[in-house]
Amino acid sequence: MRRDHERDQCRSARVDPGAGRLPSGLYDAVLLDRDGTLIEDVPYNGDPEKVRPMPGAREAVDRLRAAGLRLAVVSNQSGLARGCFSGEDLRRVNARVEELLGPFHTWQICPHGEPDGCGCRKPAPGLVHAAARALGTTPARCVMVGDIGADMTAAAAAGAAGILVPTPATRSAEVAAAPTVAVDLPDAVAEILRRMRLVAAPDPPSRRGTVLVVRSDAAGDVLVTGPGIRAVAAGAERVVLLCGPRGRAAAELLPGVDEIIEWPLPWIDAPAPPVDPAGLRGLTDRLAAVGADEAVIFTSFHQSALPLALLLRLAGVPRISAISDDYPGSLLDVRHRVPVGVPEPERALSLAAAAGFALPADDEPELRLRMDRLPPAPAALGTPGYVVLHPGSSAETRACPSELATRIVRVLAAAGYRVVVTGGPDERELTARVAAAGGADLGGRTGLAELAAVVARAGALVVGNTGPAHLAAALGVPVVSLFAPTVPFGQWGPYRVPTVRLGDAGAACRDTRATRCPVPGHPCLTDVEPGRVLEALRLLGVPAGPPEPVGTVPATGGVTR
């Protein structure tokens, strides 16, 4: 009875009743691991005299307080379950932490041991959810700072951002898998404040005419630019979006777009076609016909905005904003630079902010779709809650290996999950083979809008690093991310949605940006055990659905990638 009473005491949260209104911006709150992050890690410490702050910890948390951010401590304390110290010992240790580092708005403690199977012990997301509730916000508006992989997994599974501050005890695999890595706690705080400043626009500009926004490339690239485009739309009378053929379907689903110009850009597409002078003259004439008062050119971190900026100058656009590390001469009026590692949606938002545009106070910096443009989901799929598996990708390195996908379907079906397999028109053979293990086959039967309707009713999406992952993020659907490390997860992982990352983050293909696997056998993903996907779904809180038959779904055609 005494131990149960102690546990109940430790679960309670203390929130400062005098705290002011939550600040606007990217984050409302920072959640901090205790041992190894705020203070030196003394195993099962119940003695307040052994509390030693990590170097620079007091100054770091004071910077967060000064920025108006609320602070929580989220900590596993299995020493309670083991009987290493009492609830009163824990209270005195935490009081000493506050004496040295200042007050925190809430403490969220898991008192259980690993065998207890609770939902609060990190890497489970329970403590993150509890801290967000106590602070009056959501996990998506929180950033978690911790020293081990369990901290990062808990944050991602709740939909929060994560920054790892390694110590000598942190495993190299945990460092490789982290979305962001900081040298120490002061460095992590500097990163948080830097990202908040990047997306904070100055006072709204007086100009509110026609703005041409540009985002070429594939559907996923267009989707992650959505927050930046909405920011522009909030300060413009009319928004015209220039995109490529592969992004047109996604552009149709973006809020804030009044008109779409579809035009392939030869310096963006891969493989690159020959430059056609007549085609570029036609594009210049089409851009001039827009009569834009200004243009904002959104690009990925490895692309150049300058070729299009030259055409926009020739088209008479008087003001052009873009990200450019290269000297732009007179091609740009606003030359913006972004540090490496910033998530792509925030990168786009930061350019909009540099151009003078910001999201309205009631619009979260998240991916969104125009739900009125989604068709009804096929009735044959039955009730919501099924798991969608999308094994393919336009890039070989970002696809789920077919043999693994087949095993995943078999394991999930055996565990009681209803599985729906999706893919593009050229992936029908793949999806048929994978779905034969126990899923429903929708391969080649959905365009992007139809796929969105299917994903919107799913309990989760299992997918590689490809467009449907961003579609799920825009719909708030949890993602099991089979993420090949050819590009950084922190930049391209599903944004602000509950996610579990699987795969070897330290594989030899890391940061190569390869589209064809440079290592025979695709080992970064083929070594994933299907049981890990099952564990990920349970960590995300996705229950197995009732065993319903899934009927034949009529074909609708179109592309899904």
Image (tube, rainbow, N blue to C red):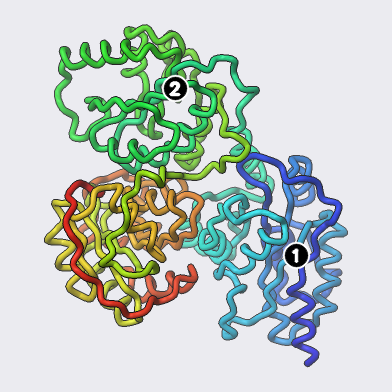
Q: Quadrant of residue 74?
A: bottom right
The structure residue drawn at horizontal position 67% and vertical position 74%, both measured from the top left corner, is 110
Front one among 311 and 38 = 311
In the rendered view, would you say 233 is above or below 60?
above
Labelled disc at residue 151: none
Question: What residue type is disc 1 on?
Answer: Trp
Pinpoint residue 217: horizontal percent, then vertical percent. Answer: 29, 35
Pinpoint residue 519: horizontal percent, then vertical percent. Answer: 24, 56
In the rendered view, would you say 291 is above or below 179?
above
The structure residue drawn at horizontal position 77% and vertical position 72%, both measured from the top left corner, is 12
**Answer yes or no: do the residues labelled 1 and 2 have beta carbons within 8 Å?**
no
Asked whether residue 445 is in view, the answer is yes
Q: Quadrant of residue 310?
A: top left
| In this picture, residue 338 sits left or right of residue 252 | right
Asked whether residue 561 is in view, the answer is no
Q: Which residue is mark 1?
A: 107
Q: If the image is split into quadrants, where does the N terminus sit?
A: bottom right
Pinpoint residue 418: horizontal percent, then vertical percent. Answer: 32, 73
The structure residue drawn at horizontal position 72% and vertical position 56%, both measured from the top left corner, is 135
Q: Secondary structure at mark 2?
A: strand
Q: Quadrant of residue 138?
A: bottom right
| In this picture, residue 313 sits left or right of residue 434 | right
